[in-house]
Image (cartoon, rainbow, N blue to C red):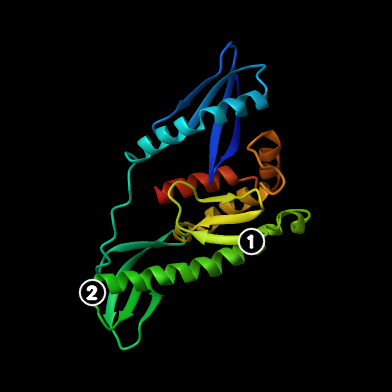
């Protein structure tokens, strides 16, 4: 039995799937409760045939994923009140709201301190915190992108044509066919080594668009401990 990871583009979405090759005659597609797509394939099935089957069933796969995702554990909705905990670069910070003439957000000794004219208005605090996260995400992700490009022997070959940051529902990042790197804005909550994993993973797609053996050979070469970083990301952000 062998296992491979691959993906296809389906409209605006990327469908990732795991191919498990066994001694069998038919090809079967299943969507697991965690929304993982599993393909049970014959040992001699070609990737072209497997991808064609996934494309044919893509609409069904997306429906199944949406069904399961609605039952996945969700982070409790933020209330933006004093004492609430917020993640930044893998660390927990307690929210502290301080009345002040100048609106400002800072990190001070384990606290996420929000200075505001309206300390009793949670929506004002929320807007200030979200703006601060966006600002930090743009600065941090740009910095980490440049540093992670240096992992590759020819950095310019792997440089994306653009960096887009926005909130995503299911993914931490993706690389478009046009070479644009898309990162989930929530990734700013994750540890730096996990941010580096996501960026490096997506940069590998500049050379290897699919999750085949060549992709993982490249990823193993430039980031040997990627699995540990991925596990930490899932543990911290679950």
Q: From the top left corner, tell me how far across and down residue 126 is, in percent.
A: 32, 69
Q: Is residue 151 above or below residue 110?
A: above
The residue carrying mark 2 is: 121
Q: Residue at x 54, y 37 (%)?
A: 16
Residue 41 occupies quadrant: top right
Any part of residue 168 in sight = yes
Q: Quadrant of the N terminus?
A: top right
Dot 1: few (<14), some (14–19), or many (≥20) neighbours within 10 Å? few
Q: Is residue 144 left or right of residue 84?
A: right
- SS class, disc 2: loop
The residue carrying mark 1 is: 162
229 or 20, which is in the foreground?
20
Q: Residue at x 33, y 43 (%)?
A: 73
Q: From the top left corner, tell me how far across and down residue 79 is, in percent.
A: 25, 63
Residue 42 occupies quadrant: top right
- SS class, disc 1: strand
Q: From the top left corner, tell me how far across and down residue 34 is, in percent.
A: 41, 35
- Of labels 1 and 2, earlier in sequence is 2
Q: Residue at x 54, y 43 (%)?
A: 11
Q: Label 1 to label 2, Cα distance in Å?
A: 37 Å
Q: Residue at x 61, y 34 (%)?
A: 6
Of tags 1 and 2, which is closer to the observer?
1
Q: From the top left corner, tell me how far across and down residue 40 is, in percent.
A: 54, 21
Q: Residue furthest bottom?
A: 101
Q: Is residue 123 left or right of residue 162?
A: left
Q: Is residue 201 above or below residue 58?
A: below
Q: Is residue 205 left or right of residue 79?
A: right
Q: Is residue 62 above or below residue 49?
A: below
Q: Are marks 1 and 2 in contact (CB under 8 Å)?
A: no
In the rendering, which numbered label is found on residue 115?
none
């Amino acid at each position: 039995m062998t296992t491979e990871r691959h993906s296809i583009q389906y409209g605006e979405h990327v469908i990732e799937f795991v191919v498990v090759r066994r001694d069998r005659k038919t090809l079967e597609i299943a969507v697991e409760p965690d929304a993982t797509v599993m393909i049970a394939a014959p040992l001699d099935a070609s990737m072209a045939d497997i991808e064609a089957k996934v494309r044919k069933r893509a609409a069904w796969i997306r429906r199944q994923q949406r069904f399961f995702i609605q039952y996945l554990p969700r982070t409790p909705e933020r209330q933006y009140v004093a004492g609430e905990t917020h993640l930044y670069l893998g660390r927990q910070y307690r929210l502290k709201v301080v009345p002040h003439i100048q609106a400002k957000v800072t990190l001070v000794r384990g606290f996420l301190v929000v200075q505001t004219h309206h300390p009793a208005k949670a929506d004002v605090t929320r807007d200030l915190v979200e703006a601060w996260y966006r600002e930090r995400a743009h600065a941090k992700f740009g910095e980490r992108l440049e540093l992670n490009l240096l992992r590759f022997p020819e950095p310019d070959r792997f440089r994306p044509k653009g960096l887009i940051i926005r909130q995503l529902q299911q993914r931490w990042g993706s690389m478009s066919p046009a070479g644009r790197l898309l990162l989930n804005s929530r990734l700013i909550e994750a540890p730096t080594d996990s941010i580096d994993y996501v960026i490096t993973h997506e940069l590998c797609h500049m050379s290897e668009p699919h999750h085949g053996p060549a992709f993982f050979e490249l990823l193993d070469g430039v980031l040997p401990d990627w699995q540990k970083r991925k596990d930490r990301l899932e543990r911290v952000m679950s």
